[in-house]
Image (cartoon, helix red, strand yellow):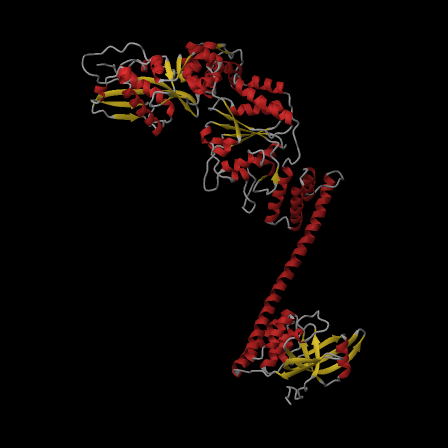
Amino acid sequence: MSQLRSGASAPRSPFPLLPLRTGVLFPGTVLTLPVGRPRSVALLNAVHAGDVIGVIAQRDPKREDPRREDLHDIGTFARVVDISRVSNGYRLVIEGLDRFALSALVETEPTWRAEGTLAPEFLGDAEEARLLAASLRERAREVGPKTGTNLAEIAATSRAEPGVFADQVAGALGLPTEKEMEVLSELRVVPRLQRVAGLLAEASALADLKKKIDGDVRRELGKGQREVILREQLRAIQKELAGGEEGEDELSALRRRLDEAGLPEEARAVADRELRRLESVGPQSAEHNVIRTYLEWIADLPWSARAEVKDDLDAVKAKLDEEHRGLDDVKRRILEHMAVLKLTGKARATILCFAGPPGVGKTSLGQSIADATGRPFVRISLGGVHDEAELRGHRRTYVGALPGRIVHALKKAKVKNPIVLLDEVDKLGAGWRGSPEAALLEVLDPEQNRTFVDHYLELPFDLSEVVFLCTVNDLGALSAPLRDRLEVIELSGYTPDEKIAIARSHLVPKQLKEHAIDPGSLSITDEALAAIVRDYTREAGVRQLGREIKKLCRAVALEIARAADGKAPRVVVEASDLGTYLGKVRFFSDVAERTSVAGVATGLAWTPVGGDILFIETSRMPGKGRVEITGQLGDVMKESAKAALTYVRSHAIELGVDTAKLEAEDLHIHVPAGGVPKDGPSAGVTMFTALTSLLSARRVRSDTAMTGECTLRGRVLPVGGIKSKVLAAHRAGIKRVVLPQKNARDAEEIPKEVRAELELIFVEDMSQVIAAALEEAPIEAAGTGGVTGAAAGEPAAAA
């Protein structure tokens, strides 16, 4: 029979077994536990003090009737120290003696009985075990006071061998059952000491952390109590300042604003969640300011506020007529758009885009629409914006994050149905931060913008009631998807008469008011205004005209300020006085001078700032039949020049051109203003006319300009920008304009007063162009020699 450490004999199998729901009995320790299960009570009735029983831990503490598989493999032989009866059962005191290995559970009624064998320890290196035990003893003395256990007492009084001492320390740590079983199951003494040392270190760290947390909690409680007292005092002060009424603290005011904002269900849920977070963090926390700013943005947005919209179309028309001269087609399109909004009651109509050169009134049209309909007007300038977050906002994870410009505009408008003008959409950039133009696709799509989500808010906001207007100078700069979402209304520019009327009714009164000049002190004649438009400006809009009138008013203001008697003199500005006030003439018509020689033709071009005229100059010189093309031309214009020359050569007999001389001469085609890039097919007709003029020695009529694309077969194809080009020709003093026949339908867009002053010639073939543009008789040859040159400023010579 095996001997236990106490000298007692190990019980024979089968021996009484007491399963423990929780906890482990270690050898060398004493355990007091309550006993209440019927089989456990039956066991206590069958044993006496001094008897040895087996004690083993259950794997599942909820198991009421454990079987073999529900018990661990290693248990402890224990000596019964005391059995006493208490009110709700029994109390048992047992002392752990040695480990045993459970083999089988042989009986369960009336008590548990088991078979098992004594599990011997493996000491290993005795010296290492002794040193580890000594180290563990010192560490237990240090940790004991921090953990609130009797570790220090065990370290001071225990004289047990290393293995048992490790068991005693493990039993005093109050470990979970799983970790206690790890120690109990370790039969090797040295690894057991190492494992217990690790568990002791964990207990020490946990005690330090608990102490720190307790200290922090005490400090926070102290701060909290102090804040409560201060807030109560502040509330009392606010009450006194308010004349006895209760003051409203910051959190209550924010909650009230959110209640009044009319938030949708999803936004309300997010706001309530953030309010709870705001209440849980202190005002001194950085997170407090972030949450408060976010909630203030939610409260400031017009989730349900709407402006009362006026749908009187006559009032809209009157407002547009009052503030904008001409633009009849544009006004009609705007009224049609507003009529759709009136009939449908929804703003989900096509989004208008005003396209035209600078200074024609695109932005002011949006302001006029807003004034006439009673909606707030907000302008968002998009020129140079190259970051997608500028429109959609930054995510709140970034320091200093804010919503994008769309949400800023809505906050400024304070209603959810304003008129928002997206200015200079074609000037949007794109970079590594994303494409802001792509972000506009959702904003400007009536089917998508009802759930617009700003990155900062992360909440859907309904933009479907916002009336979006866009302005662009160059439609070609827009992507195809964005262009598809817009209904384009083109503003090509004003006629001279319209500019004079605008100056008389708007620009002059505005500048007189800004310069504090009495309207009776300055009078500008119509002839003077016409001269300013003709000689000092060359633009589609009226912006430069406004600057010239401003300059004139400054000069007059100086005369008034210098008046000796202090009385404002009456100044009448005639056309002849403009040189005194505005300086020398800036623009003059040189069409007749430049086309006075053969080989020069006047063409028409479209630019983002309006239409313009350009000259095609040609020259020939002795050479080897080469062709030189200059003027910073694009590939399309170069190809047009080559196609025109091919047509001239193939129809040389009809055009009166000597092809034999072409092999011995070089041709040079030049388009002045070499610093400006030029491209496009619409100069084909002009190049053909210039070459025919050069080679046939017939001058181009000085009062004629032309545009159109030319094919190798001499067909004239239609081009774009007809209205802008014709207006440019009218500004330059041209009287006759040659246009493609298929552009005849575009002539309806040209103002009536311009059409009345111009002769529009529509052609289908280059033979018609030659008949309309070239003079009948060739230039008299300067001599009998060959042709040496024909260019602007040079005498032409013909063979």
- Residue 101 point in image, percent of width and height: 63, 80
- Asked whether the viewer can see residue 329, the reply is yes
- Asked whether the viewer can see residue 598, the reply is no
Residue 333 appears in which quarter of the rendering? top right
Q: Nearer the viewer, residue 738 or 40?
A: 738
- Residue 490 point in image, percent of width and height: 49, 23
Residue at position x 61%, y 25% from top? 340
In the picture as drawn, the residue positioned furthest to the right comes out as: 87
Is the residue 544 above or below the residue 133 in the image? Answer: above
Residue 95 appears in which quarter of the rendering? bottom right
Picture quarter with the N terminus:
bottom right
Is the residue 210 above or below the residue 377 in the image? Answer: below
Judge from the rendering whether residue 292 lies leftward or rightward of residue 669; answer left or right. right
Judge from the rendering whether residue 386 lies leftward or rightward of residue 198; answer left or right. left
In the picture as drawn, the residue positioned furthest to the bottom comes out as: 1
Q: Nearer the viewer, residue 762 or 350?
A: 762
Judge from the rendering whether residue 96 lies leftward or rightward of residue 696; answer left or right. right
Residue at position x 68%, y 44% from top? 251
Picture quarter with the C terminus:
top left
Q: Nearer the viewer, residue 267 or 622?
A: 622
- Residue 522 point in image, percent of width and height: 50, 12
In the picture as drawn, the residue positioned furthest to the left comes out as: 785
